[in-house]
Image (spheres, grey):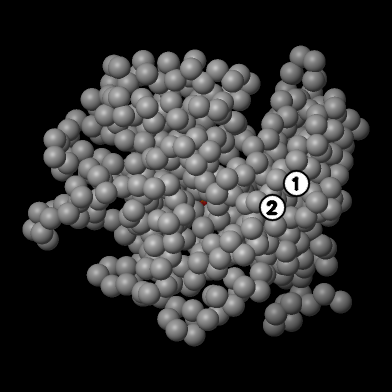
Amino acid sequence: MHRIMNDISPQSLHEWDRTHYWHSFTQMAEYEPLVIERADGVWLFDTKGRKLLDGASSMWCNVHGHNHPKINAAISEQLGKVAHATSLGMSCDTTIQFAKRLVDITPDGLEHVFFSSDGSSAIEVALKAAFQYWTQCDTPQPAKTKFLAFGQAYHGDTLGAASVGGIAEFRGLFAPLLLDVLQAPQPNGRTNDAAFYLEAVEKILQQQSKQIAAMVIEPLVQGAAGMVMQPAGFVKGLRELADRYDVLLILDEVATGFGRTGALFACQREQVLPDFLCLGKGITGGYLPMSATLTTPRIWKAFLGDAASGRALYHGHTYSGNPLAAAAGLASLNLFEEEKTIANLAPKIERLGERLAELAESPHVAHPRQCGMIVAVDLVANQQTGEPFSKEARVGRRVAHAALERGVWLRARNDMTYALPPLSITLTEIDILMDAMTVGVESLQR
Ligand SMILES: Cc1ncc(COP(=O)(O)O)c(C=O)c1O
């Protein structure tokens, strides 16, 4: 018999979950409770006694698996010292060490770390700091008040981050509240022609760079857009354009950071040094909320002065730089070294690729794609014509449901599905994951 804390029955929990817990991005009128009690490695255990493979890494943040003894121990040890120390005029030894480690592992030239608690806030910090930089750098350009963003980007849900996002469902209603942002077309992953898209960006910069503070992009893969992948050289080209037109470059690696693309950071694959690097999700291995905005001495120096100068960055959050999260982050980085996480990805990436190629044979699959430990396919009614399924067919729900029946938690939309497992997944577990994804997609034939 499955019982949980305080002897609350699963039925009561499910009822309270539907009634009192307002879930993110969820139509609560249709929500079917899926309540996780514990987890281990890539496996989640729910209140119905089911064991489910975490095929989306708990929304793209879990790295080394759940319940890892070394991350657990690091958090416990820190808890015995201090759970929180503010970052406002105060510090904590663990958080300082974590800042230093982040500087060590990110591209040379990123030397300063501003901590927040979620990915959206890491973006807000970069946007505000980029704007402020142009008001107080050596040659101020206060007309630079706009940002350039890309197609269906997703950078988070706070109003600044949502302003640079392009997914209609997320931003449409809120449009009157958002910043004035310029949109460049995004590479759609169907052509390797980076030059074509860079030309479009350059045209915008030629006309409006004097008003643009920064460009912001998810490098290599636009996640929420539908795992849309960019041609090689695109991010590198953006760096060159940013330099040529005197615009800052913000790279949002909230989703791609910490090994997801097969390198520790996506910008390393393009050998690009951004002006701001935004990190979140996997920064603590997926254990505690934390994010970071890293920047260069050029930006940092523009913020220095005496207290009366007004040059400080007036932004911060109560839990910025939380030591428990920093301890988890340090433990996660230690695991990257001890377990050779990145080096060990090669066979896993290969196996995911092989299984993706098999899945691509399925009649409702189009545009199979992979970047490191992410595989995705579009779901189409007709593979030949690319005709989409109708909204009413609710194919995303059907795919996810069929995968769940096979013991795998997958995210699927009406137009696509993907797998993005913890990096610690084994080859056998990859087969379980991809078997379920295949069964999910094949269920659409019935
Ligand atoms: C690329 C990217 N940036 C920013 C965010 C926002 O992060 P958070 O949900 O932690 O605010 C996300 C979340 O999915 C993301 O994928």
Q: Could you say whether the residue bearing mark 1 is in a helix, strand or loop?
A: helix
Residue at the disc numbered 1: 347
Name the amino acid, label 1: Pro
Q: Point out residue 207 in the picture as x, y percentages from the top left corner.
A: 29, 16
Residue 300 drawn at (x, y percent): 25, 50
Dot 2: within a 10 Å radius of its alpha carbon, few (fewer than 14), some, or many (20 or more) residues? Answer: some
> Against 433, is 332 above or below?
below
Q: Residues within 10 Å of mark 1 (few under 14, many from 20)?
A: few
Image disc number at residue 344:
2
Provide the secondary structure element on which disc 2 rests. Answer: loop
- Residue at (36%, 15%) from the top-left corner? 203
Q: CA distance from mark 2 to mark 1?
A: 7 Å
Foreground residue among 195 and 163:
195
Identify which residue is drawn at 81% across, 65% down: 48
Tell whether 363 sits left or right of 338. Answer: right
Question: Whole-percent x and y of residue 326?
Answer: 46, 67
* Amino acid type assigned to the residue bearing label 2 in the image: Asn
Q: Residue 246 occupies which quadrant of the picture?
A: top left
The reply, left or right, for residue 111 in relation to residue 399 is left
Q: Tell me the residue at 49%/85% (across/down).
A: 80
Q: What number is the disc on residue 276?
A: none
| Left/right of residue 431 with respect to residue 368 in the rendered view | right
